[in-house]
């Protein structure tokens, strides 16, 4: 072994150039690609797979619907806390160790979730599952960028984008199948063999980066402020609508806590020497800052529309959970099919701004078309509309994902992927929370509007009431007064169904408008075609 000597107090090793980053090839490259995509999809599938099983979990564990909602909330809070810390934790623990440990934590927590004896044990293990799963998305993305050469970055982004879109869509489909044919605990047990296989594959084939960024001081203050601020914000978004927002005192207090903690977090991270989350990367990269806004909007639209569509077709059109998943699945296949060609096209010089413009305009059209659906719509009416969704998401995800790392070097890429994924997660949370609140407000407004047309002087309303009364009298044998009450209840039911239908259509239209208004942001993006990303020291 060569002896390291001192030269004027400076070690020779310190003056040596960083070891060159070596890119994986052949079979190892394929296995690493499959491993990170499967791991990222595990995390994304589990954000939605449990949603269709909440009723069964409530009945089986004897919990109220309000309590069982914490199964979703705890996972989301853990996710959004750990995602931006993934770069820091990778540097602290070693990226390979951190990644494998996160997969194993996610898998073990899935086992205990399925075995949970009561609702609060399930909530606790679901939180642990979220801590493990939160690391998988940004770290998988960083590993993929390390595995592929800079000139193959578009292809890598295309591959990763398939998982981003397939995961949330596969969740309800897989969850509906498991609940219908097995039981709710299989929504967690299904992760175990896949997780163990992914952990073994990462242990066997994944290498630690040659250039390591050691952490000499742990930023406990930044971590604490992030956990309190982001955790409180996620709690507000998850629980605010069901608690009537600021009409509930503790929602108000959590809002104040989130606001103060996040302001303090931003100030601290910008002024400390070794921040847990390097927010200065947003200052160094204007494109990342713009991309963060666009990523937030994409998360809002993707999760907001994915929240409204199943509710609309299941509550009003009578779709089963499994049928809903089957209807959504082809759109994800379209995204998967076009992701790789789009990534290669970007490698060859196609402008990402043009691709994003096409994608955002197409997603706006998709939401507009959904806003025109009626109570007579069937699965066949949604086929081409949802294919347009898949087309649009492919054109959006790949450019916006590449935009997050454009022009960045070394460990900045790890910070950028963590921030980008956190922003998308928060965008989805805002999308679900605000859309849910918007729908509730619009239902009330439409109900008032529809009731204004119902009176004793409206011939259509009188005829409808008389028809219901006659049916109630003849078939149910009700007295005239009972038939009158039954008729009024039937009219009220019709009004509520129509009010919800109109409110769902309004929600789709709102997302279409937001995407249309965001198009001018693309003009602010500046792409330097001659600049290549340095991945040699990514975390």
Image (cartoon, grey):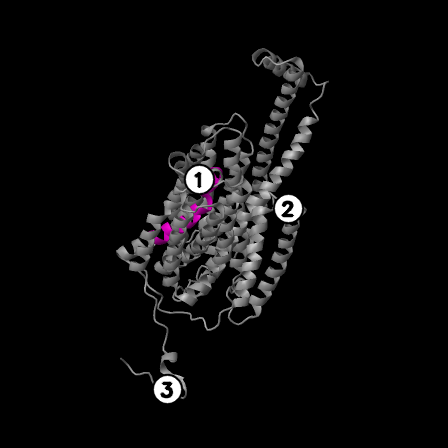
The residue carrying pointer 1 sits among few (fewer than 14), some (14 to 19) or many (20 or more) residues within 10 Å by Cα, namely many
Nearest to viewer (mark 2 / mark 3)? 2
Residue 407: give x, y in percent of width and height.
Answer: 46, 62
**Residue that mark 1 sits on:** 172
The residue carrying pointer 3 sits among few (fewer than 14), some (14 to 19) or many (20 or more) residues within 10 Å by Cα, namely few
Q: Where on the picture, by quarter, is residue 154? A: bottom left
The quarter of the rendered structure image containing the N terminus is bottom left
227 relative to 339, above or below: below
351 relative to 499, above or below: below
**Residue that mark 2 sits on:** 245
Considering every residue shown, the one lying at the far top of the view is: 474
Residue at horizontal 60 percent and vertical 25 percent from the top: 494
Please report whichever mark, 1 or 3, sits nearer to the chain's N-terminal start: 3
Nearest to viewer (mark 1 / mark 3)? 1
| SS label for mark 3 | strand
Considering every residue shown, the one lying at the far right of the view is: 457
Q: Which mark is residue 6?
A: 3
Res 410 seen here: no
Please report whichever mark, 2 or 3, sits nearer to the chain's N-terminal start: 3
In the image, is residue 446 part of the stretch drawn in magenta? no
Q: Where on the picture, by quarter, is residue 336? A: top left
| SS label for mark 1 | helix
């Amino acid at each position: 072994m060569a002896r390291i000597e001192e030269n004027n107090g400076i070690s020779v090793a310190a003056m040596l150039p960083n070891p060159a980053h070596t890119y994986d090839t052949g079979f190892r490259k394929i296995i690493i690609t499959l491993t990170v995509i499967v791991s990222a999809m595990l995390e994304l599938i589990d954000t939605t797979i449990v949603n269709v099983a909440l009723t069964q979990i409530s009945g089986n564990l004897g919990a109220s619907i309000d309590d069982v909602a914490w199964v979703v909330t705890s996972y989301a809070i853990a996710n959004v806390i750990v995602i931006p810390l993934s770069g820091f934790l990778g540097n602290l623990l070693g990226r390979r160790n951190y990644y494998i440990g996160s997969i194993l934590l996610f898998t073990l927590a899935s086992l205990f979730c399925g075995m949970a004896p009561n609702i609060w044990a399930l909530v606790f293990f679901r939180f642990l599952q979220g801590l493990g799963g939160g690391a998988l998305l940004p770290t998988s993305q960083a590993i993929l960028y390390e595995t592929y050469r800079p000139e193959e970055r578009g292809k890598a982004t295309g591959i990763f984008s398939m998982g981003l879109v397939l995961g949330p869509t596969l969740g309800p489909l897989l969850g509906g199948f498991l609940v219908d044919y097995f039981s709710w605990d299989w929504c967690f047990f299904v992760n175990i063999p896949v997780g163990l296989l992914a952990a073994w594959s990462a242990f066997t084939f994944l290498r630690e980066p040659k250039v390591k960024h050691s952490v000499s001081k742990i930023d406990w203050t930044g971590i604490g402020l992030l956990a309190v601020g982001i955790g409180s914000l996620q709690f507000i978004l998850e629980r605010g609508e069901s608690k009537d927002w600021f009409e509930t005192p503790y929602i108000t207090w959590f809002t104040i806590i989130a606001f103060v903690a996040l302001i303090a977090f931003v100030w601290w991270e910008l002024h400390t020497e070794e921040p847990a989350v390097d927010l200065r990367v947003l200052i160094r990269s204007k494109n990342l800052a713009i991309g963060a806004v666009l990523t937030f909007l994409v998360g809002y639209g993707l999760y907001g529309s994915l929240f409204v569509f199943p509710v609309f077709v299941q509550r009003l059109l009578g779709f089963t959970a499994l049928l809903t998943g089957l209807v959504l699945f082809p759109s994800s296949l379209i995204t998967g099919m076009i992701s790789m060609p789009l990534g290669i096209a970007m490698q060859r010089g196609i402008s990402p701004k043009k691709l994003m413009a096409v994608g955002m305009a197409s997603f706006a059209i998709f939401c507009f078309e959904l806003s025109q659906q009626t109570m007579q719509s069937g699965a066949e009416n949604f086929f081409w509309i949802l294919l347009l969704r898949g087309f649009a998401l492919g054109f959006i995800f790949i450019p916006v994902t590449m935009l997050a790392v454009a022009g960045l070097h070394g460990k900045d890429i790890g910070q950028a992927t963590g921030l980008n994924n956190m922003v998308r997660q928060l965008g989805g949370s805002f999308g679900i929370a605000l859309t849910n609140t918007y729908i509730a407000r619009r239902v009330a407004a439409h109900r008032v509007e529809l009731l204004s047309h119902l009176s004793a002087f409206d011939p259509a309303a009188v005829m409808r009431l008389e028809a219901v009364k006659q049916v109630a009298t003849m078939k149910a044998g009700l007295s005239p007064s009972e038939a009158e009450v039954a008729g009024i209840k039937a009219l009220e039911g019709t009004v509520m169904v129509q009010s919800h239908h109109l409110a769902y259509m309004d929600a789709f239209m709102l997302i279409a408008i937001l995407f249309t208004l965001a198009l001018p942001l693309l003009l602010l993006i500046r792409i330097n075609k001659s600049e290549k990303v340095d991945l040699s020291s990514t975390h």
